Amino acid sequence: MISVSDALSHLLNLVSPLEAEMVPLAKASSRVLARDVTARRDQPPFSASAMDGYAVKGAEVELHAMFKVIGEAAAGHRFDGVVGAGQAVRIFTGAPIPEGAGFVVIQEDVTRKGDLITITGEPGDGDNIRPRGGDFFDGETVSAPCRLSPSDIALLAAMNIAEVPVTRRPEIALISTGDELVMPGSTPGPDQIIASNTFGLKALLEGLGAHVRILPIANDTLGSLKTAFSLTEGVDLVVTIGGASVGDHDLVADVAESLGMERSFYKVAMRPGKPLMAGRMGRAAMVGLPGNPVSAMVCGHIFLAPMIKKMLGEAHIQPALLSAPLATPLGPNGPREHYMRAVLKQDGQIQPFDRQDSSLLSVLAQADVLLVRPPHDKIRSIGDTVHYLRL
Ligand code: AMP
Ligand code: MG
C-alpha cells in the first residue's frame, strides 16, 4: 500500500500535457488557454467620451462659460472638424473626442438654447474622457495557461482575437464492470442495481474540460472485459470502475495485464478508495477505481481531477487544502488517510456526517467538503483545526 501523495505522483507521471488546437472564441469558454495571446489593437482605439455631453477646450471650462455648438459626434461617427475657442461639439458616450477638445461637460451641467450652451452646473475636475489604450494597448498579453472565464472571453473579443489556442480536451473512456449493473432508465432484475459511478464521474470530468465516453457495462467475465477494453482505442485515459479488489469476480487487473498494462501501483492507504490500481496501456493511462460509489467519486476528485488538469496544462493541479475548526469530536484515525464526507456550517465549523460508509451516495450528495484526516491522526476535539477540500 502506498500513500495518497505517492499514488498521486505516480498517476501524474502517467499523463502529459496535450497539444493545442484552435477554437472559435464563442467555443472557448472554460477551455484552458495553451499559448499567450496578444491584443491586436488599442482599446479604446481613440480617446473617447465617457459620457453624453459637450466636448470643449479644457482651459475654457468654468461655471457660466458659454459655447457655440458647431456639430455632433456619436459612437461610430466622429466629428471631422476642429473645436476652436468658444466652440463645443455635442458628443455621446463612446464617440471619438474631436481634435482641439480636451474635456466633456456632461449634459446635466449645461443649459442649451438653440446653438448656444452655458455651463450652469459645477463641472468638476474629471474630464470624462477615456484615453486611447486606457483598457489595453496593442501587443498586451493574456498569459497561458489560464482557464478562460466569461470575463477573459470578453477581453479576448475586445482584443480582436477570433480564434483561441486551447489545449485539446482529454479523451476519457469509462468502463463500469459488474454483472449486477444496468444503465439508468432500464428495468433492473431482482439482483441488480443501477450503474451510478460512470455518470457521476462523467459529470465531474466533463466539468473540468475532458471529453468522456461511457462504454457499455462489462460483465464479470474475461471476454466481456476484453471487449470493453477493445473499445478504448485512441483515448488518453481508460478508467474502469469496480472489479479491482481480490474477490473471485474481480478480473480487471488480470484482463488489463493480459492486454499489456504495465502496473504502476495497486492499493492506496486511503479511506474510501483502497483498491485503486493504475498503469500504462500503450499510449493511454489506465486507472482502475474501486466500485463502491463514494470511493469511485472520491478517487475521481483526488486522483482523476489532477490528472485531467495536468493533461490540460493547467498551472494548479492539486486541490487546495483548506482548514476549519471541527464541530464535533473525532476518535483516532487508523493507518489510512480518511476523506470524510462533511459540511461546512454557517459558523465556519466543519461537521462530518455520522454515516461514512462508502456506498452512501445520499450522504456524498449532501456533503460540500471532504474532511481530510492524515493516517494515525490523534483524537480530535471540538474546535481543533482540521483540513478539508471543497467538493
Ligand atoms: P466491486 O469493486 O466490483 O467489488 O464493487 C464494489 C461495490 O460497488 C459493489 O457493491 C458493486 O455493486 C458496486 N458498484 C460497482 N460498480 C458500480 C457502478 N458503476 N455504479 C454503482 N455501483 C457500483
Ligand atoms: Mg464488481
Image: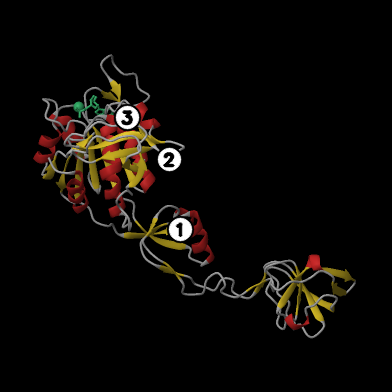
Using the rendered view, name the quadrant where residue 252 is placed: top left
What is the number of the mark on residue 24? 1
Residue 196 is labelled as 3
User: Residue at position x 14%, y 43% from top?
Assistant: 2
Mark 1 vs mark 2, foreground winner is 2
- 176 relative to 279 in the view: left or right: right
Which mark is in front, 3 or 2? 2
Residue corresponding to mark 2: 348
Q: Position of residue 254 (x, y in %)?
A: 10, 35
- Mark 2 closeness class: few <14, some 14–19, many ≥20 residues within 10 Å: few
**Residue type (three-letter) at the residue carrying disc 2:** Gly
Q: Residues within 10 Å of mark 1 (few under 14, many from 20)?
A: few
Identified at 34% across, 29% down, the residue is: 353
Q: Determine the CA span between mark 1 and mark 2.
A: 42 Å
Say whether disc 3 or disc 2 marks the residue closer to the N-terminus. 3
Dot 3: element: loop
Q: Amino acid at mark 3?
A: Ser
Ligand 1 within 8 Å of disc 3? The answer is: yes
Separation of disc 1 and disc 3 at Cα?
A: 34 Å
Q: Amino acid at mark 1?
A: Pro
